[in-house]
Image (cartoon, grey):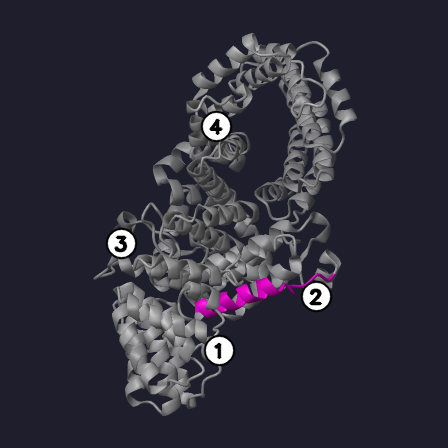
Amino acid sequence: MGGAALALWLDSRNSPAVDPPAPASVTDPALSDLPQAAPAEQQAIEVALAEARLSEFDLAIQRLAALVEHGSEPAVEEALFLLARTQYEAGDPAAAAASLDSYLAGYPDSPAAARARLLRAEARIAVGSLDGAIEDLVAYVSADGPAAAYAYRRLGDVSVSVGDSVTAVSSYRSALQGGLGRYEESRVMLEISRLLDHQGDLAGALYWAERTAVSTPSTRDRVNALSHVKGIAMALGDSEAWQSVALRLASDFPEYSPSAAALNDLLEHGVYVEPGVAARLYIEHGSFGAAEEQLLSAVTQGDGAVAAEAAYLLGIMRQLSGDFEAALAWFRQSQPPVGAEYAFDHQWRSHQTAVETGEEGASQALEAFIGDHPGTIEAVSGIELLARSAERGGDSAEAAGYWLVAAEAAEAAEDYARAASAARTAGRLWQESGDDVLAAGALERATDLGGASFVALRAADDLSEIGEAGRQDAFYAETPVDDWLAAYDGGVRFQNEGNERALGTVQELWAVAERGTGDAIMSDLAGLGRYNPGALLAMARQASMRGQVASAAEAADVLVDRVPPGFMPLPAEVGALAYPRPFVEFVSEEADANEVDSNLVYALMKQESYYRPRAHSIADARGLTQVIPSTAYEIAGDLGVSGFELEHLYKPPLSIRFGTYYLGVQLEAFDGDPYAALAAYNGGPGNAARWGEGGGSTDPDVFVANIDFGETQNYVRRVMENLAHYRALYPEAGG
């Protein structure tokens, strides 16, 4: 970075501000169809864009305003639009609206005029000028802009705000032309239903609620839609319909609060509800006493089938509480009728609890069950149970053998994470017993199956302890992406018209700084493309070309997570999309200054903020490295940063500086142990010291197991997994 730092970055070191050099190519793709400014002016625009990306909005606004005042005509046109967008991003929608007034007055026929209207609509909504926003949104959809579906959605929102539900319904229906993504579309449909209900059109409301329930990919939205269907049916006096829906909610979605309300409605109206259905719902909501009361009553008063299911559920409750003797007794009392849905699970749980109680012959019976049901998750669980039973009995060799068989069974069931964990456990047991040959074979299998997971990372460390080379560098290779993709997915590509429209919406929203909604639709697309590698790669590339690092990483992450071991190593391009290095000049300088591995800084940044500079958590942590206010003020004092304000944490240079410094402090405090340092960063130094007791200071497995904060335990695992990816992709960047 050298002398090319930005204002706050330099101020924090008491240095004079200088202009940063322009990046090699940051021209905004959103304005590529405008006339090009002169080279010097274009360089100034690119510098302003770079400043805006670093949240240095004041500098960017000053630079763009100067171009608007003194630039050539092409420069003025481009700079004026960017000035408005930067003002909007900086939280000054009134100034943005005024700049866009000037833009549209001076360039009404510009290729970017429709986009300017969309941006002005958002600015006007923010300042409460809703009539003007409606005018702009109507103009945008009339021009058939790429984000027309989104504009119709916003037009519906504004119409609701001004009390025009008729226009709102019409606008929302137009928003369903495609381009919002399925999650957003399902929420629009549910809003249509609610508006029609409010208007008294119950038939229309019922149609849209039922359509939502059928089409939404979101379970929560489906539950809300079904709950609305139930309410409409009750209003229509259709007892059969509402009771049917209420029973479906209670039985199929017991964990959701609308389902609890549905059960209450049924009971209040004297409708019979099977004890098992009611008990499951009560258990989900922590009402164990009510659940037990229901089930005990059913056991004593119900018919054979009802009593059998109630006994089975009582057995599960006892099993979950750790009372295996009582659980086994209830399972033995329950005799599922032929064809009962729970019959297989009942059989599995009976064998499971018999082994847990140490019943004679239980292990042999479980082995027979496993042999009769190969390839099932229950078979995998059964083998793991036999392995743990052997461990408790002190037979490490037998236990290791069981764990290796469990790994093979999990691999056959395509549960690779579970397979890797079982293989590593086998390797550790053989390692502890001194059989390094068998240990190495099992641990190598764990690294093969686990990819870059925490388990595979630890297995590689285990291999190094017994003198074998780990495989942490085998995640990626310089493989041609198209060749790899053709082998992986048979050449399937992203050729879905609806998804293409949604991508167009995303790109337009990014262009007008509506990144939150754009990112949400992109996330929706990534989820829907989960089983289409070509689609995921196309989305990641599109986002990366637009400079949307987080969205590119999200799509690529789904792709990386879905790859089975047989298709490792991944092409390095895919890895670079999933594990990018944004703001590299700042990260490199701060990592060097604090003697921290820059790859570890990126691994932390991915987990903390997912590369989003303006990330803000419910704990009030802010910025790329998610520093909380109290810690930020301490760091500012330590580093002598004068005039520090919490808003500065959204500026990447300062966030990187503070986060890297604090990580360095923790690494020094814990003798360079990254596990303890990361735990301290997330859960506090005092807790990290506590977790290091009892062998945790020397054994990472013990340390991680000692972490009694679920969030921190997962955090440490994920950051270390991220680190393995970064080191594999950027070995020269380590420190």
Q: Nearer the viewer, mark 1 or mark 3?
A: 1
Q: In the image, which disc is placed on residue 638?
A: 3
Q: In the image, which disc is placed on residue 482?
A: 2
Q: Amino acid at mark 3?
A: Asp
| Residue that carries the numbered disc 1 in the rendered image | 25
Q: Residue at x 70, y 14 (%)?
A: 362
The numbered mark, 2 or 3, whose residue comes first in the sequence reads: 2
Quadrant of residue 685 within the rendered picture: top left
- What is the secondary structure assignment of the residue under circle 3? helix
Instruction: Tell me if label 2 and label 4 are in contact, CB under 8 Å.
Output: no
Q: Amino acid at mark 4?
A: Glu
Q: Amino acid at mark 1?
A: Ser
The numbered mark, 1 or 3, whose residue comes first in the sequence reads: 1
Relative horizontal placement of residue 128, taking residue 35 as reference (left or right): left
Tell me residue 592's x, y (percent). 43, 61
* Highlighted range, magenta: 491-510
Question: Marks 3/4: CA distance?
Answer: 48 Å
> Crowding near pointer 1: few (<14 within 10 Å), some, many (20+)?
few
Q: In the image, which disc is placed on residue 510?
A: none
Q: Nearer the viewer, mark 2 or mark 4?
A: 4
Query: Does residue 557 belong to the magenta stretch?
Result: no
Question: Marks 2/3: CA distance?
Answer: 50 Å
